[in-house]
Image (tube, coloured by chain):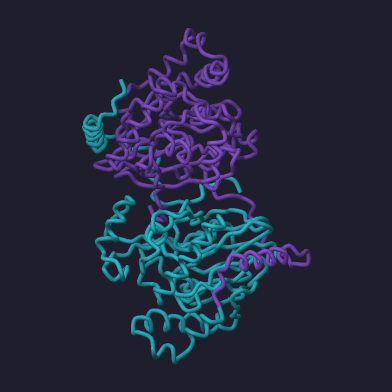
Chain colours: A purple, B cyan
Amino acid sequence: MMDLNRRNLMTATIAVGAASLMPSAAKAAAPAAGKQAAGFYRYKVGDIEVTVVTDGANRLPVTDAFVVNVKKEEVNAALTALHMEPGFFIGPYNPIIINNGGKLALFDTGTSEATFATSKGRTGQFMTNLAAAGIDPAAIDTVIISHYHGDHINGLLKADKSLAFPNAEVLVPANEHQYFMDDGEMSRAPKGRIEDVFKNVRRVISGDVLKRLRTYDWDKEVIPGVLAVGTPGHTPGHTSHVVSSGSAKVYVQADVTHAPYLFVRNPGWHAFYDQDPVMAEATRRKVYDMLVAEKMLVQGFHYPFPSVAHVEKSGTGYREIPVAWNPVL
Amino acid sequence: MMDLNRRNLMTATIAVGAASLMPSAAKAAAPAAGKQAAGFYRYKVGDIEVTVVTDGANRLPVTDAFVVNVKKEEVNAALTALHMEPGFFIGPYNPIIINNGGKLALFDTGTSEATFATSKGRTGQFMTNLAAAGIDPAAIDTVIISHYHGDHINGLLKADKSLAFPNAEVLVPANEHQYFMDDGEMSRAPKGRIEDVFKNVRRVISGDVLKRLRTYDWDKEVIPGVLAVGTPGHTPGHTSHVVSSGSAKVYVQADVTHAPYLFVRNPGWHAFYDQDPVMAEATRRKVYDMLVAEKMLVQGFHYPFPSVAHVEKSGTGYREIPVAWNPVL
């Protein structure tokens, strides 16, 4: 009676598929929902409440320029082995908010709501998912920026260019700010970086944002429970944060790696995003060796939502172990 | 400037942790939310819309009786390696709803809302998460039952014992129904199974439920797009379902395995839930070999939410590859 034979299963399934497409089928009382759930997720780090709020995920073509030291065929082979669509890279964006009892602090902002239209709804979801999570943008006390790439800062501004978080102080790494605001550095940068990063920084980090801005230093506490850790390479002032309460910790890595299915598994791959790929790789291996040794939880901005995992060594690289969704807080 | 040295990181972090606990810290304007997100998730299988709606996850002590052919020390070692708490097994419950354009069909029911109080909110979440997903229980046309264990049927009844899905036909595997409704089988069963399963089946599968009940057979279409596949062992009439539309498919496995982190990784482990553990293991290996060969998506009732994955061979068993959360449908 048990029929799991491959050929029979395939044949039976095709027959069922054909039947289900018959135009004579009665319509369901309920229409399809046609809409994904609002992506937010909560967990505790000691007394600190963390809320992950997704901004969505982009879908970019895989070219030879995507991983600069690896042919696109090798990238596509990895995607196929992961049961992902070859030829396209899915890059998620996942800011977090922490409530440490004293501050409601947002870590990075996502791509901005302006990208919702241009990405056909794939990205720019942060503000609507934040509302679904019951968090008023006006209640955000602090925005802690990891580095000055657009997907981390552009959400500081709404589509109408007003402040997305009108009551928040904006805390940025001092060396990142100094580097990208330096006209001499801009003049020596390659053209692509001038257009995509330097000019974008000057567009966003200006006006009301600049008035609310304060710089912070590595190896110092940014707000209670949040330690800034220098993790340069991706950008010169790229910063990660250790969020801790009592003995509980999570390492908020920002862009130490991009999406783990490619760049945690293959720490030697140099994504085009990394400004200094050799330094970025050295940082990556040092951070991941520490995460493995300490068994420390990692929160990855570009990990798939809810983007919180442990990591283990695997082959010549590492492997992420996503935390199982906890239906209670 | 980059300081990822383990000792320094630990020291710095402890200092920060102490600072964050100072009673003089100002209170945040926003209180902690204190509540997890409603757990539902959507994806498409061809033209069919699937909505996964979690009922929650239980937390059971690991004893030698939990995996009957493995010592609890070995189970706990596996949990530790997975960065999960040793001594406790987290068992999620994840029903799905499909909309095939003709029917809104629920697959299994979860533990029932009555367990919300007894589990301190860990389980019994299905009806509230269904509401969050925008699905009216009265709009469910069909409930397709995989087998007669309580976590799959008890949700047919609300806490007040009325029908949870008042307009739904209840479709059950013919051989499962025959076996568990047979008084002779009950008389020959071990005491625990009489109390936990046979008597519970008679409590739930009665009255209004029985009036709406229709049996279905293996290797036949249950509703358009849904093929019943016999996967016995866990119970005598345990049934899985292949949901398909065009060339797209998902294998809705019910309890071919329990939670994948233990029982997909170790297909030879015999959980106490399996009525005929030898047959259950043979079924499990046959199904998983097929899933690997066909690269077929699997939806697992006891996988962590959203409980949809691919699988690959790993060592002497298999390994699940959770689908990356897709922020758009």
- Residue at 38%, 47% (x, y): give it: A43
Picture coordinates of residue B86, whole percent (x, y): 27, 57
Pick the front one: A269 or A283: A269
Q: Is residue B111 above or below residue A48?
A: below
Q: Does residue B74 appear in the picture of this structure?
A: yes
Which one is nearer the viewer's eye here, A37 or B263?
Answer: B263
Q: Quadrant of the N terminus of chain B?
A: top left
Seen in the picture, residue A136 relative to A220 is either above or below; the reply is below
Horizontal side of A141 relative to A149 (left or right) equals: left
Q: Residue at x 59, y 65 (%)?
A: A6
From where the camera sits, is residue A155 visible?
Answer: no
Query: Which residue reaches farthest right?
Result: A24
Q: Where is residue B237? Give x, y as percent.
A: 50, 78
Q: Is residue A289 left or right of residue B298?
A: left
Q: Is residue A190 above or below residue A141?
A: above
Rendered position, A302 above or below B85: above
Whole-percent x and y of residue A144?
A: 41, 29
Locate residue B78: give its quadrant. bottom left
Question: Residue B136 in the image: x percent, y percent?
Answer: 59, 63
Q: Nearer the viewer, residue A36 or B272?
A: B272
Q: Quadrant of residue A45?
A: top left
